[in-house]
Amino acid sequence: MEGWFGQVSTELAAAWAIAKKDILIWYLKPGIIVSGMLFPLFMFLAFAVGRPAEPTVLVPGLVAITILFSASSIEPVSIPIERRMNTFDRLLSAPISLHAVVLGESLSGFLYSIGIALVPLAAGLAVFRAGIVGPAFLVAGVVLTAFCFSTMGTLFAAYPTESPGDIMSMLNLVRLPLIFISGVFIPLSQLPSAGQFIALLSPLTYGSDLIRAGFTGEAHFGPAVDVGLLLVFILVFQFAANLLYRRFND
């Protein structure tokens, strides 16, 4: 038991060291600020301006797409550049497991997203006068959605390229459609039957539903379903990322 506990502690310490390295190096890079903060803001304005939507729809939608873009923006930039500088290869050859590497890279995007999400959340409370009626739902939605999409960013960054643009292009082919199929700005109950079926395939559907429950007290699928499926997506993304990094770096 002590050996197992010591190994887990070592792996978690290594994951935190990787995340801390990314925090110090990458958080203030212009490309990450644009893709993580400004782009979701412009997307929100494009959909929200002129629409007679309630704050309980607009604010959760803004928080959700901010998390989507900010959480998945660190690794697609940092990992290709580190490949170009040969520092990522040294990281992979370190005496830690690949699980620790994937977890550490995901943690950096997760923490970045949590910080960024506080901005639209505060703006929603101050400007739109949106009230929080389910704080536990809101916290769970923000935390799980952020970690889910940071892991997705790590998964896409497994593609063996030294150009961040290559990964960002592929990632945007996924991120942009997610906004339209996930009921972010249109409640799921108002989507046509085909749209509701497609929405079931998107992790953003469950994240935005849980975040919206924080403002309304109600979730389309129910908080337990949202939490459970977000955890499933996280595990799938983590597992797939481990497989791809192992395949591309053998």
Image: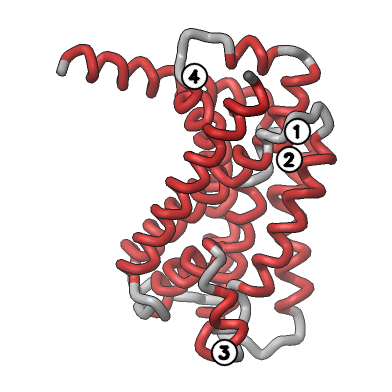
> Nearest the camera: 166 or 26?
166
Q: In the visual, does 186 lie left or right of 167? A: left
> Would you say the residues marked 1 and 2 are in contact, meaning their CB atoms lie under 8 Å apart?
yes
Within 10 Å of disc 1 (Cα), the crowding (few <14, some 14-19, many 20+) is few
| Tag 1 secondary structure | loop
Q: Which mark is residue 29?
A: 1
Q: CA distance from mark 2 to mark 4?
A: 20 Å
Within 10 Å of disc 4 (Cα), the crowding (few <14, some 14-19, many 20+) is some
Q: Which mark is residue 17?
A: 4
Disc 3: which residue: 193
Which of discs 3 and 2 lies nearer the camera? The answer is 3
Residue flagged by tag 1: what amino acid is it?
Lys
Residue flagged by tag 3: what amino acid is it?
Ser
| Tag 4 secondary structure | helix
| Label 4 vs 1, first from the N-terminus | 4
Tell me the residue at 63%/43% (across/down). 153
